[in-house]
Image (cartoon, rainbow, N blue to C red):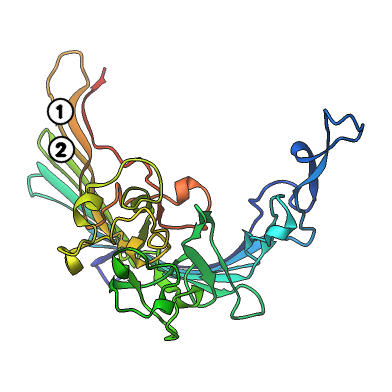
Amino acid sequence: MSGISWITDLKIRGGWGQMGNQEIANYNEFTTFRTSLAASAYDIGGTNTSVVPGFDSDRFGNPDGKWETTTTLDIGFDATISNKFTINFDWYDRTTTDMLYVLTLPGTQGSASFPYQNVGEMNNKGIDLALNWSDASQSGEFTYDIGLNFTHYKNEIVKLSENVAEGFFGEARREQVYTRNEAGHPWSAIYGWVVDGFTDGTEPEGEYPGYYGYLDGRGRYHYVDLDNNNVINDNDRDFIGNPHPDFTYGLNFNASYKNFDLALFFQGSQGNDLVNYVSRWIDYWMFQGNRSKRMRYESWTPELGDAATLPIASANDNISTRPSTAFVENGSYFRMKNLMIGYNIPNLRGVDRLRVYFQATNLFTITNYSGLDPEVNINGGGSDANLGFDEGYFPTSRQFMIGVNLGF
């Protein structure tokens, strides 16, 4: 390709490989025991005044567990055009088999913790794209570069077992479970009832067992009867949200003019859903603590009617807080992560470099999410069973700094 002058550099890449993962607790294959007065004790001496601790199951073992395996196919290229424009592109297909996961066993198994088990197959397909443009004025006094990165992937559970219809739920939060894993759906998909307004008191009594009794049943959440049997129960739950974004992106801009320099970094996510679990604490009577202004002014009343955003405020309502679309919000956001402006002070005797700068981080965020921060981490950095689950983590703080770089 030596005759193509506008292509400075071009590399085509491809790769295939497998990687194992055994990042689970030690001794997963062994059943362990413990001594515990609370779980296992007996007055073996017959004194009627004291007990002796006994042995109790601490964790069940899984001798059949094995490493999970991830197989990745990657195709991409790197290109530089006219020494100014660079492109880095990757397409990948990543399949994980024998996934290691802690399944919830029946309560009749006892209080012991459960081991990791191999539960099936999951696939991720996606693209990573990075673009960068660098240029300068003819005099060279002004230089700049603009960089854009873009990531898109699709996550899908291929199977959990030989039973295609099998599924299992994520971790419970205060006796409620908000996610479900099932073949054909993304990992940790949000699962619950669909709310389509408020009850008006004309619904069949059998449709909401135990849901009436205040203001003739008006002002409660109206759940969609998906199976049309005039009863709202577990069979009316559905997949109501996807914690995986349609795409994420970042934008960098760097420029310098004479002794001034400027750096900007923007970052965002588009199309992911979040469970606003904080709303369950502050918008309803379920738990003790402070309440939101929204509960005071936007709860259903006969005057507000369908203009309300929350059901009627009732201390006897333990149904409106069940997992539903009322707690699912669009978590898309656009954030200015960093701004830095600097100036190099020239011609100082005995000083090689003196630069003063101003820096601001997390300057602003554009989002429709009503929680504290749409940039929610994965369950506090722990389990991935509840992706996109906002329990009120401390929001990213805004910071301002003034600094000096000095070199001799």
Total tally of numbered discs in the picture: 2
Residue 181 picture location, percent across and down: 53, 69
Q: Is mark 1 on a helix, strand or loop?
A: strand
Quick one: 371 or 304, which is closer to the camera?
Answer: 304
Q: How crowded is mark 1: few (under 14 residues within 10 Å), some or many (20 or more)?
A: some
Badge 2: few (under 14), some or many (20 or more) residues near its Cα, within 10 Å?
A: some
Residue 347 located left or right of residue 177: left
- Are the residues at dot 1 and dot 2 in contact (C-beta closer than 8 Å)? yes
| Placement of the N terminus among the 4 image quadrants | bottom left
Q: Which residue lies furthest to the top in this view?
A: 350
Q: Residue furthest bottom?
A: 228
Q: Name the residue under label 1.
A: 344
What residue sits 26% from the left and 53% below the top? Answer: 370
Toward the viewer: 17 or 7? 17
> What is the spatial separation of the Cα atoms under label 1 and label 2, in whole angstroms?
8 Å
Quadrant assignment, res 356? top left
Q: Residue 295, percent across and down?
A: 25, 52
In this rendered view, identify the residue nearer to me: 223 or 304: 304
Residue ID for mark 2: 261
Q: Residue at x 83, y 32 (%)?
A: 51
Q: Is residue 29 left or right of residue 247?
A: right
Query: What's the residue type where badge 1 is placed?
Result: Asn
